Image (cartoon, grey):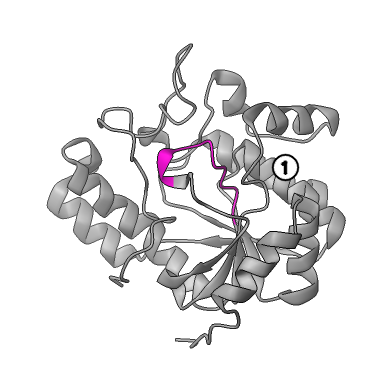
């Protein structure tokens, strides 16, 4: 496994956050200082449409990757190909370990995630977190579509962060302060291709069996794991913790 040495101190990260105020500035800095060992993780939601467009305008050779969990909606597969052709970019597709998936499904069933929070987190761990870890082990930084208004767990997220769960690499959240209206306005004004699930009421897009459209007045993340109670629902990709793989 590639061993990463943390290149930045917390003081340096604080300094970056104090002087870099826009998404474009954050991405220009990433291109100048981390490319090609920085990449955008994309689930092809609305936020990803915006960031990928910004990135290609700054550096056409920026790297992009996505997680094919084996349970993605067809609309997500469709937009993946549309975006790849529009921007003439490569999208690195990561897959979960087949043996891990087989053992989990054989032991707990195809739809184990509906049975308990523990099962759901296990499924996310195997299908998403483990392949993500393998990718991040090869990078010095990664770019996300996190926004502060998405969940309470993201209230303290900054544009630049040290990702202690992945060897101290740099985590870059360029649109952390953007609103949902800003995201939609950018997509419309720039005529961006986007995931058609957004037109069907999906404000947050994940695996097909774990995502539904939201209802009028619901929180934008209400469609994710809707059968679970509480406001702290995450798949594990953005939670700092000890590695289990």
Q: Is residue 215 above or below residue 57?
A: above
Classify residue 239 as left or right of residue 140: left
- Asked whether residue 17 appears in the rendered view, the answer is yes
Image quarter where the C terminus lies is bottom left
Q: Is residue 162 magenta?
A: no
Residue at image position (22%, 35%) is 114
Q: Residue 42, relative to residue 46: is it above or below?
A: below
Name the dominant secondary structure of the magenta segment.
loop
Which residue ends up furthest to the left in the rendered image? 107
Q: Is residue 90 visible?
A: no
Q: Is residue 201 left or right of residue 178?
A: left
User: In the rendering, at what x and y percent does residue 122 appear?
Assistant: 25, 54
> Which is more toward the observer, 158 or 77?
158
- Taking depth in this image into account, of 189 and 123 the one nearest to the observer is 189
Which quadrant would residue 152 be assigned to in this image?
Answer: top left
Secondary structure beneath disc 1?
Answer: helix
Q: Is residue 147 left or right of residue 105?
A: right
Is 150 included in the stretch rendered in magenta?
Answer: yes
Residue 199 location, x and y as percent? 62, 21
Between residues 206 and 237, which one lies in front from this camera angle?
237
Query: Which residue is painted at 45% across and 31% down in the image?
Result: 221
Q: Residue at x 54, y 20 (%)?
A: 201
* The one of 180 and 48 positioned closer to us in this rendering: 180
Residue 180, position in %: x, y?
Answer: 63, 30
Q: Which residue is mark 1?
A: 50
Q: Residue at x 63, y 56 (%)?
A: 159
Range of the magenta residues?
Answer: 144-153
Question: Residue 240: x percent and y percent?
Answer: 38, 62
* Quadrant for the N terminus in the image: bottom left
């Amino acid at each position: 496994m590639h061993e990463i040495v943390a290149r930045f101190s917390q003081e340096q990260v604080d300094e970056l956050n104090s002087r870099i105020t826009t998404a474009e500035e954050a991405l220009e800095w990433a291109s100048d200082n981390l490319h090609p060992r920085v990449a955008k993780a994309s689930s092809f939601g609305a936020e990803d449409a915006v960031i990928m467009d910004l990135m290609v305008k700054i550096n056409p050779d920026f790297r992009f990757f996505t997680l094919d969990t084996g349970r993605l909606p067809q609309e997500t597969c469709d937009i993946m190909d549309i975006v790849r052709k529009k921007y003439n970019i490569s999208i690195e597709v990561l897959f979960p370990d087949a043996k891990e998936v087989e053992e989990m499904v054989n032991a707990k069933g195809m739809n184990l995630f509906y049975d308990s929070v523990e099962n759901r987190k296990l499924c996310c761990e195997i299908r998403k977190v483990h392949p993500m870890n393998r990718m991040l082990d090869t990078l010095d930084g990664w770019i996300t579509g996190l926004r502060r208004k998405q969940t309470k767990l993201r209230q303290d997220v900054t544009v630049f962060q040290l990702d202690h769960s992945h060897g101290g690499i740099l985590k870059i959240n360029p649109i952390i302060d953007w609103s949902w209206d800003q995201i939609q306005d950018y997509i419309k004004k720039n005529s961006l291709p986007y995931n058609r699930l957004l037109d069907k009421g999906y404000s947050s897009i994940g695996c097909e069996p774990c995502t539904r459209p939201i209802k009028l007045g619901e929180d934008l993340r209400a469609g994710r794991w809707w059968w679970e109670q509480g406001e702290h629902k995450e798949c594990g990709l953005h939670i700092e913790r000890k590695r289990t793989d």
